[in-house]
Image (cartoon, rainbow, N blue to C red):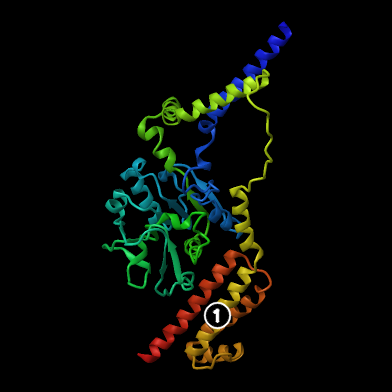
């Protein structure tokens, strides 16, 4: 009898321990994996899909978890700041961000509101009529990576308010700004008033994916996802330690804690032999995780021949436009184009055209994302050089 009592006490203590762990588990789980707009969150409100996709495409992608005054001193970096906790960010941090951009870096702020953004950078958003996600037709752009954006899905359907020193990068067909830019020194800061469009839920809708790819093209070194918002708005900003956090959690989730304790009691009674009904075992079905969705999305773009197809499209467009500029019909041979360009715009320009076309031909079998971006920029530069000659001729 005593042995049976000891066994029952042991089972009770085990069940009690499991119940305590079940109650504390939501507090012990790292918040980065569930926080909206976090690059660690594979759910619908996270941005893990775009982070994994950029990494799969060969870019150097990392998280930034320190203050902004410790950002990398070198130039050529890009920082994605997605719906930051502006309550924990002061003028000192915003000043550090401005100075970092002036040194030749790019910051991209996806935020729906914030007085500090307007006060320090002049950015603010204005709502547009319409409930729920809206499919917005986009006006044409001359930028390489924005040229093929026709429509965007905007969950909040906001626009950028015009202001002094703010340049429109992308607009809708009514001329209202969807993406704005402020140039600072050698760098720049972009602003998008609809952060939900980059989340896992909307990134693969219409042409939303092309927008972060455009910003990523400025990354000569590392593309950072800012994860410092939680800490900046946490203990240091509001004086809340782990004890206060646990107390607040029990105040909000007390009913769930009581339910878990009741379930633990019923389990203990079941182990003790108390029966309220015949046990029924349900068939367990495997649930697909959000990580599988994220990996499938990234693998889809990796497995396809997106880079080679993109190069072929850019090459055809480049040759067609150059032929038109020098007065040749579409489909003219590259040798004829080189000879014509050399006679009109100079041998150096003709030589640049020949080297560029030869390199594109070599890269058709295998090309990385960085090489594709570089070749696109080279084509744009060559096109502009020929365009300058044509402009001088017309003048």
Nearer-the-camera pick, 317 or 32: 32
Question: Which residue does the image show at 54% across and 27% down from the upper left?
Answer: 260
- 63 relative to 361, above or below: above
- Image check: 190 left or right of 124? right
Q: Nearer the viewer, residue 347 or 191?
A: 191
Task: Quarter of the image for the N terminus: give it.
Answer: top right
> Residue 170: x and y, percent?
39, 68
Which quadrant holds the C terminus?
A: bottom left
**Up-down relation of residue 106 to residue 233 (above or below):** below
Which residue is depicted at the point 41% across and 75% down? 140
**In the rendered image of this protein, does residue 14 appear above or below residue 171?**
above
Residue 270 is situated, as x and y percent measured from the top left of the image, at 65, 22
Secondary element at image label 1:
helix
Q: Residue furthest front?
A: 277
Mark 1 residue crowding within 10 angstroms, few (<14) / some (14–19) / many (20+): some
Towards the viewer: 291 or 304: 291
* Residue depicted at 65% across the width and 73% down the height: 363
In this picture, residue 174 sits left or right of residue 145? left
Q: Position of residue 314 (x, y in %)?
A: 55, 77
Above/below status of 36 relative to 323: above
Q: Residue at x 57, y 64 (%)?
A: 370
Residue 93: image quadrant is: top left
- Percent across and percent down for residue 58 are 61, 59
Q: Which residue is mark 1?
A: 352
Question: How many numbered discs, if any?
Answer: 1
């Amino acid at each position: 009898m005593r042995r049976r009592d000891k066994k029952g006490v042991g089972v009770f203590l085990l069940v009690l321990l499991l119940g305590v762990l079940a109650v504390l588990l939501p507090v012990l789980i790292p918040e980065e994996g569930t926080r909206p707009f976090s690059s660690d969150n594979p759910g619908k409100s996270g941005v893990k899909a775009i982070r994994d996709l950029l990494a799969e495409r060969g870019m150097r992608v990392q998280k930034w978890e320190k203050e902004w005054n410790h950002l990398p001193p070198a130039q050529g970096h890009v920082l994605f700041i997605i719906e930051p906790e502006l309550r924990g960010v002061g003028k000192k941090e915003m000043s550090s961000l401005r100075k970092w951009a002036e040194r030749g870096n790019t910051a991209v702020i996806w935020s729906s509101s914030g007085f500090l953004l307007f006060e320090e950078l002049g950015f603010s958003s204005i709502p547009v009529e319409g409930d729920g996600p809206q499919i917005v037709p986009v006006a044409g752009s001359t930028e390489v990576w924005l040229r093929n954006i026709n429509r965007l899905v905007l969950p909040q359907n906001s626009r950028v308010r015009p202001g002094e020193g703010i340049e429109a990068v992308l607009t809708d067909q009514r001329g209202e700004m969807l993406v704005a830019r402020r140039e600072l020194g050698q760098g720049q800061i972009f602003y998008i008033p609809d952060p939900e469009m980059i989340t896992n839920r909307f990134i693969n809708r219409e042409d939303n994916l092309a927008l972060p790819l455009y910003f990523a093209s400025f990354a000569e070194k590392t593309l950072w996802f800012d994860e410092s918002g939680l800490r900046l708005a946490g203990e240091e900003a509001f004086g809340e330690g782990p004890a206060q956090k646990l107390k607040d959690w029990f105040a909000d989730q007390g009913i769930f804690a009581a339910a878990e304790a009741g379930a633990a009691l019923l389990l203990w009674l079941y182990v003790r032999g108390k029966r309220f009904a015949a046990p029924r075992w349900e068939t367990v079905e495997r649930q697909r995780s959000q990580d599988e969705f994220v990996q499938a999305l990234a693998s889809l773009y990796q497995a396809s021949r997106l880079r080679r197809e993109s190069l072929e499209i850019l090459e055809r467009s480049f040759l067609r436009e150059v032929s038109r500029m020098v007065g040749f019909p579409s489909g003219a041979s590259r040798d004829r184009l080189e000879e014509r360009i050399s006679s009109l715009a100079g041998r150096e320009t003709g030589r640049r055209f020949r080297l560029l076309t030869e390199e594109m031909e070599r890269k058709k079998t295998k090309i990385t994302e960085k090489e594709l971006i570089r070749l696109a920029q080279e084509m744009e530069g060559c096109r502009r050089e020929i365009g300058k000659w044509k402009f001088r001729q017309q003048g």
